[in-house]
Each structure stands twice: as C-alpha cells, then as structure tokens.
Amino acid sequence: MYDGAEREYKNKVITNGLYIFIYSIILYSAVMFFWFFYSDAIYRTYVYLFGFSTILHYVYGNIARGLGQSKLYAVTGVIISFVVAASSLVLILVFKMELKALYLSNIIAAFIQVIIIEYNIKLFHCFKRKYIDISIIKSMLIFALPLSINEVVYWFLSGYNIMVITQYLGLAANGIYSIATKFSVALLLVSNCFILAWQELAYTSHSDTNRCSTYNYMLNYTAQLLLLCLILLLPLINITFKYLVALNYRASFEFIPLSLLSTCGTIYAAFLADVFNAEKKSKNIMYSTIVAVITNIVLLHLLIDKNGIQAANISLCAGILTCIIIRSIMLKKYFHEFKINIKILLCYFILFAIACKIFFLSTTVNIIFLVMLLLILSYTYKKLICKILEQLFRKIK
C-alpha cells in the first residue's frame, strides 16, 4: 500500500489482499474444524473466534495505517486495551467465567476495533471485483509466504525453550523462568512506541535514493535506545522486585538480566526485519530466523544439564545474536554504506555489564546507581529533553 499514493492503487491492493484473506479464513476454519473433530480441546468456539477476531483486527488495523489513518489505529488500540481490562474484570468477578473471560474479552475488544475502523474508512467500499488482479495476488503470496514461515518458526522458538525446561527441569523451573521473562514486558512497551512509526518510515522511504542514511541513523539510534532502557531497567527491577514477585519465585531474580538482553535483541532484530520488508526481501528474514532457531536448539541441549534454567537464556541470546549478525551482513550487501557504530555500542555493553554487576548488590547501591544514571542522562541529553518539554507545554497551552 505504500508503493503508491493514489487511492485507486490502494483500493486495488486492499481488494486483492482481502481476496487472499477470505481464502485464508476458509483454510483456517477447515484446519480448526479438523483439529476440534479429532481432539478433546476445551472452549472450541472461543478458541476459533479468538483466532478469527485476532486476524480480522490485524487486517483492519494495518489497512487503516496503509490509508494514513495512524491516529485512528492508535486511538482504537487504546480503546480496546481498556475494553479488554474492563470486560475481563466484569466477566470474571460478576459472571464467574474464569478462563472463558480471557478469550471473550479479547474477542469483544477486537470486534469493537474492527467496527470503529470500518465506520471511519469504509473498507467494503474499497473492495471492487474489477480490481482483482492475479499478478498482484501472486506477488503478495510470494512476499508473504516467507513471512508466514518466519512467524511459525519464531512461534516455535518462543515455545521450545519452555518445553525443554519443563521436560528436563520440571514445572517449578518453568514457573521461575516464566517470571524472569515477564519483566521483558517493559522493554516491549517501549519498543511498541517506536516500531509502528519505524515501519511507516521504512516503507515510505523504500524508493528514496538516500534511504540508506535513514536506515543507518534509525538502526544505530534504536540499538542505543534499547540498550539504554535495558541498563535503566536493571536497578529499577532490583528496587521493586521484592514487591512484585512472590517469595516462591524469588529464584527468578538471577535470570532477569540475560532474559532482558534476549528481549532487547529480539526487538532490534524486528527493526532490521522491517528494512527487508520495505525492500521486499522477506526471504532474508526467514533464513536468518531459521538459523537463529537451529543455534538456539543446539546450544540449549548442550547447556541444559550444566547450566539449568540459565541455558535457555544463553541459547536464546546466542540465537538472536546470530540472527542480528546475519541480517546486518545481508543489509550491508544491499547497502554498502550501511554501518553499525560498534564503538558506541561497545560503550553501552560495558555499561550494561557494570549494571549487571550492580544488579546483584543491595537495593541501596542500585538506588544510588539509578540516580547517577538519571543525572548523567539528564546532562547528556539536556537539549533533547528541553525540546520535548517545550513541545509538550505548547500542546497543553
């Protein structure tokens, strides 16, 4: 949709995309029916509707963004977050629905977002039979197939470590590992603020002859920002840990730094992937993810007996690092001017190592370290902070 500014071109892309979507839903329904028929799965209807509504709201959300309705997408995102929270509480506390409530609240929220977006963009008016073009459908499938395989492989990667920990170390170890990974949500929230904007910038810059300098600046800036957030999170988690985690799961404390580092790497790999998406080279994303998964699996099985839970973090970090290196090399191949500022990143990694060391010291030491970091950052980025505050005050006035 970013390849052309004309509304007719966008309508053509939407029509062919929806054509693929309809057949995908038919395939999804057939697979789910087959699975339900031969399994004892509970909440079948809820599971099916949850999958269907998730796909539908994802399609509507991305079409809205493609039509330049980013504010609409953001506002509906905030609305559905409140809907999920409110409906979950009502369904659990009032109607005593337990697990069903989690499915139903997300289904309701997804359909509300779809209705709001449909009301504003009139998606069905975009769909016209005359726009159906087999060549466009073919090009879409060629582009999307590697991404689909990549998503399946990544889903396997995210679940495999949990399965191996449970098998080798038991459910208690899996619970500890899960608690350690929960702190990564903070990093994901920060990344979500930027990744949608980065996607639009990358997709709209794909025809710009000077786009390599944009990629260079943004990818180096993103790496620094992620590492900075990671360093700030460590003392903050140390200070709040005992208030957030039950006594039974305090053992998860030692696994947090590497878990955060792997999340940081995953986010950066996603930013790199968006460049390949913008350049329509989705196969590169798939290849690098497959290599990352293989690296993770091999290392996990080699280390699990000796290193226990930490083996999952080590193998995941190694797999993601492999993915980042491959994607960076491939990017360098397409853009010879592309360069990651290793010296600055090395400084951040040294600071991260120091933060890790301090993380395992007392809460008092971490408070002092956090205050020092904030003071240094305030001085280093005082011009940027002043500019942001100035813009905020203008909006308030």
Image (spheres, rainbow, N blue to C red):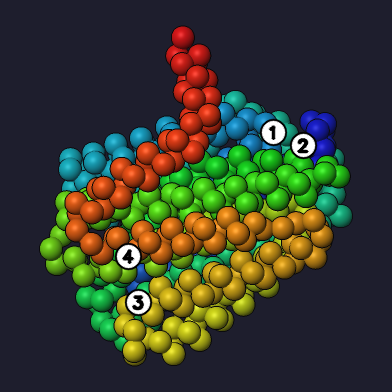
Which mark is in front, 1 or 4? 4
Contact? badges 3 and 4 (CB < 8 Å):
no
Separation of marks 1 and 2 at Cα, in angstroms: 9 Å
Local crowd size for mark 2, using a 10 Å CA cut-off: few (<14), some (14–19), many (≥20): many
Residue behind mark 2: 11
Please determine whether, in this image, residue 15 is positioned above or below residue 342.
Answer: above
To which quarter of the image does residue 335 belong?
Answer: bottom right
Residue behind mark 3: 310
Residue behind mark 1: 67
Name the N-terminal-most of marks 1 and 2: 2
- Relative image position of residue 318 (x, y in whole percent): 51, 75
Which mark is in front, 3 or 4? 4
Name the N-terminal-most of marks 3 and 1: 1
Please determine whether, in this image, residue 383 is positioned above or below residue 96.
Answer: above
Residue behind mark 4: 357
Name the N-terminal-most of marks 4 and 2: 2
Separation of marks 3 and 4 at Cα, in angstroms: 16 Å
- Relative image position of residue 16 (x, y in whole percent): 76, 47
Separation of marks 4 and 2 at Cα, in angstroms: 55 Å
Residue type at mark 4: give it.
Lys
Separation of marks 3 and 2 at Cα, in angstroms: 50 Å
Which mark is in front, 3 or 2? 3
Local crowd size for mark 1, using a 10 Å CA cut-off: few (<14), some (14–19), many (≥20): some
Please determine whether, in this image, residue 327 is positioned above or below residue 368.
Answer: below
Name the N-terminal-most of marks 3 and 4: 3
